Image (cartoon, helix red, strand yellow):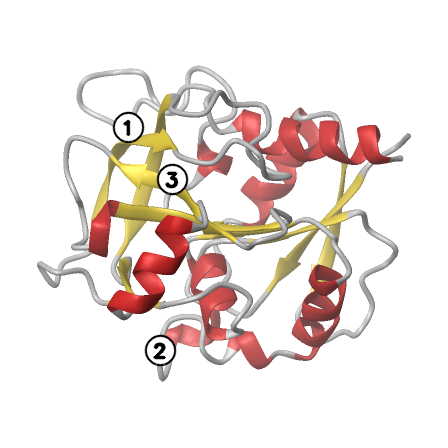
Amino acid sequence: MSVRVGVITFPGSLDDVDARRAVRLAGAEPVALWHGDHDLQGVDAIVLPGGFSYGDYLRAGAIAAHAPIMSEVADAAGKGMPVLGICNGFQMLVEAHLLPGGLIRNEHQHFIRRDQRLRVENADTAWTNGFDSGAEILIPLKNGDGGYIADDATLDRIEGEGLVAFRYLDVNPNGSLRDIAGLTNERGNVVGLMPHPEHAVEPGFGPDTRAAMRSGEDGRVFFESVVSALVAAA
């Protein structure tokens, strides 16, 4: 089976090309999709990439959540298509109510960039099945509006139902409640997280020195996971 993964470009997307490259390195065919279209071009999975869609006006991801193509994304997700939201894409998923809660300005009010250690809390999703539950991974993080929030009832529900996909380790970089770095929906086909797995898909980037981010390869597992899940389901 040839797996085709669509990556949607919005005005202000920064990491769409990186996401398509990650898809290609995982052995799938990347397909460029446009925010203003209503055509998913027959793809098998979708990535909502990082960036500053529509300039982050109103709230990060708020306008993009109402882009024309998002009605198709919501419909496809409801039918079980794997959807991954990365950083700004995660913000779109919560604004579109495909994942619960919200994302606000970082607690310290500053944009942050760092290599971030995460713990994989749920390894049973379309995007995390290549990890072991409890695995500790290193994924680059870069955001200004990454503070995850929800009311206590919602937090208790997502904890109780195992919907926390990733949790920050060592340091909570943005004030996210309960150290939540990423979520999954109940079905396990929709996953969103603030760190950027598409920037950790091969060694040498970038670069591997003490003075800069040392990405590694942990992020490639996200994209290999969805390929494996789709092939197994075919």
Residue 12 at x, y percent in the picture: 48, 66
Tell me if residue 133 comes above or below residue 78 in the rendering.
Answer: above
Residue 96 at x, y percent in the picture: 53, 74
User: 115 left or right of 217?
Assistant: left
At horizontal 45% and vertical 71% (from top left) the residue drawn is 61
Distance, label 2 to label 3, CA atoms, is 23 Å
User: 226 left or right of 44?
Assistant: left
Q: State the residue position of label 3.
A: 166
Q: Amino acid at mark 3?
A: Phe
At horizontal 34% and vertical 35% (from top left) the residue drawn is 140
- The label shown at residue 59 is 2
Determine whether the residue tagged by mark 1 lies in a helix, strand or loop. Answer: loop
Residue 224 at x, y percent in the picture: 65, 27
Query: Where the N terminus falls, by quadrant?
Result: top right
Q: Mark 2 or mark 3: which comes first in sequence?
A: 2
- The label shown at residue 70 is none
- The label shown at residue 213 is 1
